[in-house]
Amino acid sequence: MYPIVRMVKELALHARSAPLPPDGTHVSYHLCWPWDLDVWMELNNGRTLTLFDLGRIPMAMRMGLTRVLREKRWGITVAGSSVRYRRRVRLFDRVEMRSRVLGWDERFLYVEQTMWRSNGACANQILLRNAITGPNGIVPTADVAAALGISAESPELPGWVKAWIDADAERPWPPERA
């Protein structure tokens, strides 16, 4: 089940937070509850993806993106992701989540999110490709930037993000049926 109560809490908690610039980092804190666990008594990999929503959506709110989405009747979707799971998160572990927009190209926003354990070790990292959608499909990021009142010019994407974009473009679509 989607953590609606947790999302409402995060949105309420950060509703009065300072606005976040496009290059800002949203920081939030989360506990691993019993319903987040898998059979190995650690944070479930699928639940990890859901918990990343708890950082990404309040980040978008603080940047003014959710306001623009409502005004323009646009949506936002995940168009691709790559996750690294490196350290276990166990029952009642507290994690610090960091969410930031790395940059964009003509069609997509690239977002990095990380979860850090209390001992300073990075547990998980995700790179997301997000698309803003409208009635005619993907909204160009220049239009999104204009609606946000920011420069349409993206910060330079890190090399590892460019390499991921290039590698992902090599994947066949639709995939072959095995």
Image (spheres, rainbow, N blue to C red):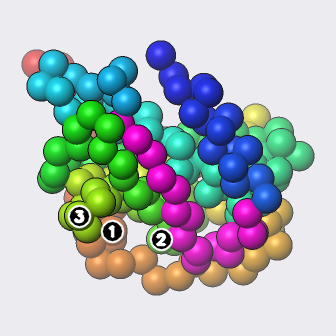
- Per the image, label 3 sits on a secondary structure element best described as loop
- Disc 1 or 2, which lies upstream in sequence? 2
The image position of residue 125, as x and y in percent, is: 30, 56
* Numbered label attached to residue 102: 2
Mark 2 or 3 closer to N-term? 2
- Can residue 141 be seen in the rendering of this structure? yes
Write down the residue under mark 1.
161
The secondary element bearing badge 2 is classed as strand
Residue at the spot 77% in from the left edge and 53% down from the top edge: 15
x, y percent for residue 94:
36, 49
Single out the residue that lies furthest toward the front: 92
Residue 101 is marked as none
- Tell me: 173 left or right of 111: left
Q: Amino acid at mark 1?
A: Val
Nearer the observer, disc 3 or disc 1?
Answer: 3
Secondary structure type for disc 1: helix
3 and 1 marks in contact (CB < 8 Å): no
**Over which residues does the magenta segment extend?**
17-32
Q: Is residue 31 magenta?
A: yes
Q: Which mark is residue 119?
A: 3
Mark 1 residue crowding within 10 angstroms, few (<14) / some (14–19) / many (20+): some
Measured in 3D between alpha carbons, the distance from the residue under mark 3 to the one under mark 1, in whole angstroms, is 27 Å
